[in-house]
Image: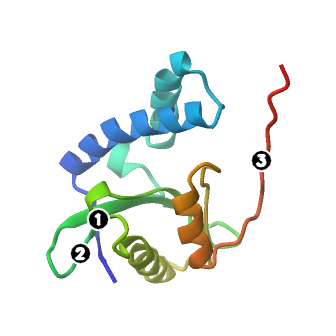
Amino acid sequence: MLNLNVMLQKDFDELMKMEVQNYADEKVKAGTWTKEESLQKSKEAFQQLLPDGLQTTHHFLLSLSNPETNDVVGYFWYHFDESHPQKEAFIYNFLIFEPYRGQGFGRRALESLEKHVKQQGVKKLSLHVFAHNKRAIHLYQQAMYDVTDINMSKYIG
């Protein structure tokens, strides 16, 4: 298990700079956005989802730390509204920082989050993963996540 802590403002500010760029890059890689428009669209998406930053209602940003060393190894961002009829939470983002990848922290993080959200009354966890992110897909499959929707594209021109 990993420790889940409410993210500090300084960590949130640093993370948002990185994640806005990462999301823009992922959308370009997926073929959803052009490089020229990607950064602006990414900024707009984050502003729409987190208009009040860390204080945005029903959004939870948690730092993940290794209990043996207290090192912050990654973070979760999820949304949960207790009034959701299926008691479903949606993971907007989950990241294990590069130096900690391949050491089991991803699996431990998911286990820790599941335990944490159960205490909030969550019955179902959902997420989105880009098709080109094979490592994440493998992790989610090992953690028993099921595919619920598939978007497909074909370039024809």
Q: Which residue is mark 2?
A: 66
| In the displayed structure image, the side of residue 33 where residue 25 appears, left or right | left
**Residue found at x 27% / y 64%:** 73
- Which image quadrant for residue 116? bottom left
**Residue located farthest toward the right when viewing the structure as drawn:** 156
Relative side of 148 to 114, left or right: right
Q: Are marks 1 and 2 in contact (CB under 8 Å)?
A: yes
Q: CA distance from mark 1 to mark 3?
A: 31 Å
Q: Is residue 138 above or below residue 21?
A: below
The total number of labels drawn is 3
SS class of the residue under badge 2?
A: loop
Task: Give the amino acid type for the residue marked by disc 2 in the picture.
Answer: Asn
- Of the pair 80 and 138, the residue shown nearer to us: 138
> What residue is at 56 percent from the left and 53 percent from the top?
133
Q: Name the residue: 17% across, 68% down.
A: 71
Residue 95: image quadrant is bottom left
For the residues labelled 1 and 2, the Cα–Cα distance comes to 10 Å
Label 3 CA crowd tier, 10 Å (few <14, some 14–19, many 20+): few
Q: From the image, tell me which residue sits under label 1.
A: 100
Mark 1 vs mark 3: in front? 1
Q: Is residue 62 visible?
A: no
Amino acid under label 1?
A: Tyr
Which amino acid lies under the numbered mark 3 shown in the image of this protein? Answer: Asn
Q: Is residue 60 above or below residue 4?
A: above
Work out whether mark 1 precedes mark 3 in sequence or the reverse, and give the earlier one.
Answer: 1
Q: Position of residue 81 (x, y in %)?
A: 56, 63
What residue did someone put label 3 on? 151
- Sequence order check: which comes first, mark 1 or mark 2? 2
